[in-house]
Image (cartoon, rainbow, N blue to C red):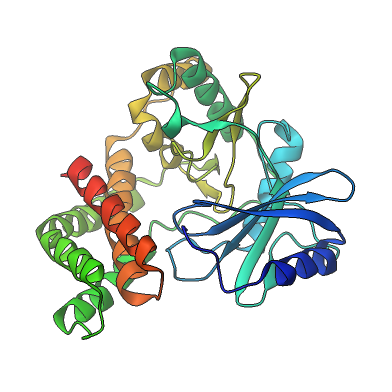
Amino acid sequence: MLGEPALTHDNICDAVKCLWGLQVTALKFVTPGGECSWGYRLETVAGARLFLKLSQPRVCGTVPCEQNLVAADELARALDHQRIVAARRSRRGRFLETVDAYQARLQPWVEGVAFMDLPGGPDAAQQHQLGELIAAIHSFTPTQRPLDEDHSAMELRDWPALQDALAAPPMDWSPTQRAVADLVREAGPYMARWIGDYHALEWRVRAAGHPCVFCHGDPSSGNVLVRPDGILVLVDLDAPAWAPRERDLFHLHLWPAALEAYQRRYPAFKADCDLLRLYQVAWDIGEVVDYGWRTLMTRQSEAQYRHDLQGLRKHLDEAT
């Protein structure tokens, strides 16, 4: 998010001290901290550099839960905290805490450049690292599994409410909000097709009964960082899942060297086209609903509305 949440810096520092027992000496808002969250880089009196992530239910579809964060921590400890970044326990022993009206996770700060920001995109060696890392995640069996994949896109339930808002727009919508509304209306035929595809694919996927593994859940280009030393790091482990491998693999379709590296680890594995299409369609549906919902159904800054208008237009250009 582009603007800060409704919290003062003193509120945040007091919360970090109370919940995690850490004295903050420097606090900086990170812009943007994420499409659906607010982020802060902080330093402690002991010299630690950390990232505080704040979110609110229904600003976007993903809602973190303690069970998933426990599983993510176990994954990070088993594979390597330098390559898998998970949340830090609070003084109460929890990974997910509450700061005022926000859910909060505290994790190590990672210096690096996201795949999406690399000039020319990731090279073959960087892609290879990602494929190997995803393969390692899929081979890990935790003591406590993350939530099971249920193949139900939360955004499908929100689409009718968003359509109702479009049918009776409030008079106080800004010009940018109205532009987003027009774009969501234009996306209606694509959404109808995607939702129809989703339901048809969901039926076939459930009937097939695919085996499940530990999945990161969202190894997209913004969540894969390359450190200055060249080591690749996966962040944003808020929504891991016990799911078919394709849950992660559909994100890798732009990076052939990543898929090749994964296939070398699992030479007998053949991706299911229905599953890959299901996850892609769910992503496309989710982007339209999340951008529309955040802009039209929650109160944000005008700068955020403009940012979301650009993001939605870019996604539709790529998806259609």
Q: Quadrant of the C terminus?
A: top left
141, 12: nearer the viewer: 12
* Res 144 seen here: no
The image shows residue 164 at horizontal and vertical percentages of 21, 81
Report the number of discs.
0
The image shows residue 186 at horizontal and vertical percentages of 11, 60
* Res 226 seen here: yes
Give the residue displayed 85% in from the left and 58% down from the top: 22
Residue 77 sits in which quadrant? top right
Relative placement, left or right, of 92 versus 209 is right
Relative placement, left or right, of 108 versus 302 is right
The image shows residue 126 at horizontal and vertical percentages of 51, 19
The image shows residue 27 at horizontal and vertical percentages of 71, 55
Residue 181 sits in which quadrant? bottom left
249 w.r.t. 34: above or below:
above
6, 75: nearer the viewer: 6
Give the residue displayed 65% in from the left and 35% down from the top: 140
Relative placement, left or right, of 238 versus 115 is right
Give the residue displayed 71% in from the left and 31% down from the top: 82
